[in-house]
């Protein structure tokens, strides 16, 4: 699991130079330059320990230990995160939020700290706090590592102070969320979804899925059976499900009626997108599988991100 903490293949060559900011949204170029400067800068000296293990105050108590890229989907946040990873010197890791929480689940909290201690830069993509347990784990992880000198770069569709809104009683964990967000310099990226800049299209639907699949390593399954299978596999293992695939075929796609199923599908779409695995599907267009009742809830941005990604993958 630790060896897999690197950018996905589509971002293997991502750099600040290859990022193409939209000229209509100056914040994209500004954030690119800010992140590049952050990575190139020397980290602040980690607080030293005094007698009995107590930490001596750092010289600059206002210094931030990370940058947090906040913006809608499709504005290039992951590209910039991968560029930061490639440009950083020293030991570094890159993973999604769910991969880091899965690491804690596998190694335990202290085991994860021991593994990551000494890392110069930890990159966290798709930062989400969907339950109080994750809130506490990530808060403690960031606190422990930042105090030993590790720096962070993270992306999300939600500002750090608003993580968890609409999904659990965020006010009960405000102190933990605030303590975490105070460690980041939040950078707002505006813009349109680059996957839909040219034309606003829906996900492609075919009538003959087997006959439309390309050559290579492909799968063919009923959509419902795939969704049911996801319930028996931990989301951290989804990457193994799609590894080395060229395309997946899905028949009889139907709208979701259960939010848990919908969220599992979102997690799979993220892994398919990381691997640039083409989707060939029949039935309901895959960007239209979320009913209004779901789109009006706290997971709206997750669903819209997944909808954007399946449009790109079905029209690849």
Image (spheres, grey):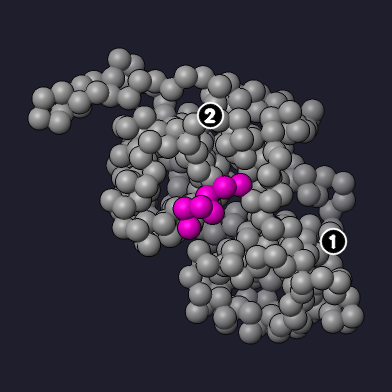
Asked if residue 165 is positioned above or below residue 241 in the image, the reply reads above
Residue 131 picture location, percent across and down: 39, 59
- Residue at the image position 49 percent from the left and 31 percent from the top: 90
- Residue at the image position 41 percent from the left and 26 percent from the top: 64
Q: Viewer-proximal residue, 259 or 208? A: 208
User: Looking at the image, is mark 2 or mark 1 earlier in the sequence?
Assistant: 2
Q: Nearer the viewer, mark 2 or mark 1?
A: 2
Q: Viewer-proximal residue, 108 or 303? A: 108
Pointer 2 and pointer 1: residues touching (CB < 8 Å)?
A: no
Tell me, yes or no, whether the highlighted magenta stretch contains residue 65.
no
Q: CA distance from mark 2 to mark 1?
A: 37 Å
Asked if residue 102 is positioned above or below residue 20 in the image, the reply reads below
Residue 164 visible here = yes
- Residue at the image position 57 percent from the left and 82 percent from the top: 228
Point out which mark residue 315 bears.
1
Give the side of residue 263 with respect to residue 137, left or right.
right
Magenta segment: 1-7
């Amino acid at each position: 699991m630790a060896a897999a903490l690197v950018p996905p293949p589509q971002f293997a060559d991502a750099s600040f130079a290859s990022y193409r900011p939209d000229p209509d949204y100056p914040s994209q170029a500004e954030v690119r330059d800010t992140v590049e400067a952050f990575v190139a800068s020397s980290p602040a000296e980690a607080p030293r320990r005094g007698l009995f293990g107590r930490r001596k105050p750092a010289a600059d108590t206002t210094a931030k230990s990370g940058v947090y890229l906040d913006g809608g989907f499709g504005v290039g946040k992951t590209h910039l995160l991968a560029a930061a990873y490639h440009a950083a010197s020293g030991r570094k890791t890159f993973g999604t939020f769910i991969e880091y929480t899965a690491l804690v689940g596998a190694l335990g909290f202290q085991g994860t700290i021991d593994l990551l201690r000494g890392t110069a830069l930890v990159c966290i993509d798709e930062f989400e706090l969907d339950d109080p347990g994750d809130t506490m784990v990530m808060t403690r992880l960031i606190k422990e590592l930042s105090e030993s000198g590790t720096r962070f770069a993270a992306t999300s569709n939600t500002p750090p102070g608003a993580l968890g809104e609409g999904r659990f009683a965020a006010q009960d964990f405000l102190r933990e969320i605030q303590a975490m967000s105070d460690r980041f310099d939040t950078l707002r990226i505006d813009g349109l979804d680059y996957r839909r800049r040219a034309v606003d299209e829906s996900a492609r639907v075919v009538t003959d899925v087997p006959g439309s699949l390309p050559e290579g390593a492909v799968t063919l399954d009923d959509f419902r059976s795939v969704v049911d299978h996801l319930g028996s596999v931990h989301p951290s293992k989804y990457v193994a499900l799609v590894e080395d695939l060229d395309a997946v075929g899905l028949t009889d796609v139907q709208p979701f009626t259960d939010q848990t199923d919908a969220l599992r599908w979102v997690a799979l779409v993220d892994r398919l997108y990381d691997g640039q695995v083409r989707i060939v599907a029949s039935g309901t267009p895959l960007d239209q599988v979320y009913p209004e009742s779901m789109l009006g809830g706290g997971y709206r941005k997750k669903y819209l991100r997944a909808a954007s990604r399946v449009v790109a993958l079905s029209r690849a």
